Amino acid sequence: MNRAPPRSPLDRTFAALADPTRRAVVDLLRAAPERAGALAEKLSASRPAMSRHLRVLRAARIVAEEPLADDGRGRVYQLRPEPFAAMRDWVVSVEAFWSDQLASFQAHVAKRAKRSAP
């Protein structure tokens, strides 16, 4: 039986953010926490579609859902910082790798240019 390897939190974050609507939700939540209905309205999405997008974002732990103080049935969504910190750390490590690789390549080219100079 061929089973897929378990997905890391970083994999879940990137998979969730692969969808443009979910990235738009993140952009809106950067400004302020919002109710699902307000997010759906601002993005011209149906409430069921927004519910599915928010479910994916919650599963990836990108957003947190909090009950409203004045309405026990209402929920407000806000961004969680942890997945973005993990993405930033990953991007920084990839950038460091490529910076090292480019510096090595630059040194190699300079060394060859010195040897071939008259």
Image (cartoon, rainbow, N blue to C red):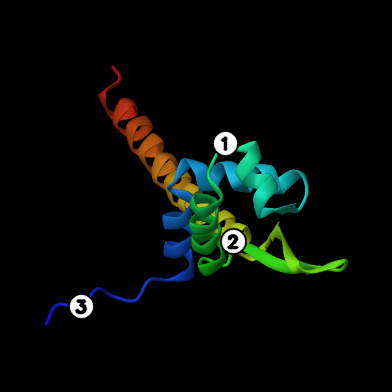
Residue 90: percent from left, percent from top: 51, 58
x 11%, y 82%: residue: 1
Query: Label 2 belongs to which residue?
Result: 62
Circle 2 crowding by C-alpha within 10 Å: few under 14, some 14–19, many from 20:
many
Identify the secondary structure beneath mark 1. Answer: loop
Residue 17: percent from left, percent from top: 48, 51
Tell which circle, 1 or 3, labels the residue nearer the N-terminal end: 3
Residue 77: percent from left, percent from top: 69, 59
Q: Are marks 3 and 2 in contact (CB under 8 Å)?
A: no
Identify the secondary structure beneath mark 3. Answer: loop
Rounded to the nearest angstrom, the CA distance separating label 2 from label 1 is 21 Å
Rounded to the nearest angstrom, the CA distance separating label 3 from label 2 is 26 Å
Image quadrant where one finds the C terminus: top left
* Vertical order, 41 against 89 (above or below): above
Judge from the rendering whether residue 76 lies leftward or rightward of residue 49; answer left or right: right
Amino acid type, callout 1: Ser
Can you tell which mark lies on residue 56?
none
Circle 3 crowding by C-alpha within 10 Å: few under 14, some 14–19, many from 20:
few
x 38%, y 71%: residue: 7
Amino acid type, callout 3: Arg
Query: Label 1 belongs to which residue?
Result: 44
Between label 1 and label 3, give the one nearer the viewer: 1
Tell which circle, 3 or 2, labels the residue nearer the N-terminal end: 3
Q: Nearer the viewer, residue 72 or 33?
A: 72
Can you tell which mark lies on residue 3?
3
Rounded to the nearest angstrom, the CA distance separating label 1 from label 3 is 38 Å
